[in-house]
Image (cartoon, rainbow, N blue to C red):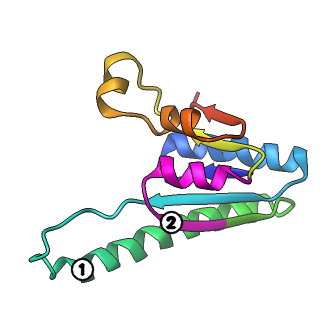
Amino acid sequence: MVIGYDRSPHSEAAMEYAVEQARVRGVPLHVVHAWQTPVFSPQATAYNTLLVDVYREESGAVAESVERWREKHPDVEITCETVSGHPVSVLAAEGATADLVVVGSRGYGGLVSAVLGSVSHGVLYHVTCPVAVVRPR
């Protein structure tokens, strides 16, 4: 089982659902945090070290958050990985061997969803296994 996770409130709701599903199914939960590297001009080499620092900080914060989930649910095997790439592409690749992919949803609808795009919408169209889209209450 795979979950796309970014520490946001909608992602936390999805994590709660995913942990419970992993427990009920007796399967491990693989937490995936997709990191999309910003594109800079080739002349902006000074930003390389800044990007590395931001990447380490973000992946460290995700790892800490996932560790808290492990502590709260020691009966569920939870692994964590930060991957460079667009969340839809990363989750589609991870979903190729998963029995379920779980994502959160900010709950945007209508025009806002069409203009901003949606990871959950993209995952529904590109992941080949079942997908659970979880919205916070």
Indicate the amino acid at tag 1.
Asn
Q: Is residue 115 visible?
A: yes
Most distant residue in the left direction: 43
Q: Position of residue 76 (x, y in %)?
A: 83, 59
All told, the count of numbered labels is 2
Q: Was residue 92 drawn as part of the magenta stretch in this picture? A: yes
Say which element carries label 2. Answer: strand
Q: Was residue 55 drawn as part of the magenta stretch in this picture? A: no
Residue drawn at point x = 47 percent, y = 26 percent: 107
Quarter where residue 113 is shown: top left
Give the crowd class for mark 2: few <14, some 14-19, many >=20 residues within 10 Å: some
Question: What's the mark number on residue 81?
Answer: none
94 in relation to 105, above or below: below
Q: Position of residue 102 (x, y in %)?
A: 65, 42
118 in relation to 81, above or below: above
Residue drawn at point x = 82 percent, y = 64 percent: 74
Residue drawn at point x = 37 percent, y = 59 percent: 36
Q: Quadrant of the C terminus?
A: top right
User: Where does label 1 land, which residue?
Assistant: 48
Indicate the amino acid at tag 2.
Val
User: Where does label 2 land, which residue?
Assistant: 83
Q: Position of residue 123 (x, y in %)?
A: 55, 39
Give the crowd class for mark 1: few <14, some 14-19, many >=20 residues within 10 Å: few
Q: Which region shows up in magenta? A: 80-97
Q: Earlier in the sequence, mark 1 or mark 2?
A: 1
Residue 5 as seen in the image, left or right of residue 71: left
How many angstroms separate mark 1 from mark 2 (CA)? 17 Å
64 in relation to 13, above or below: below
Q: Position of residue 128 (x, y in %)?
A: 67, 40
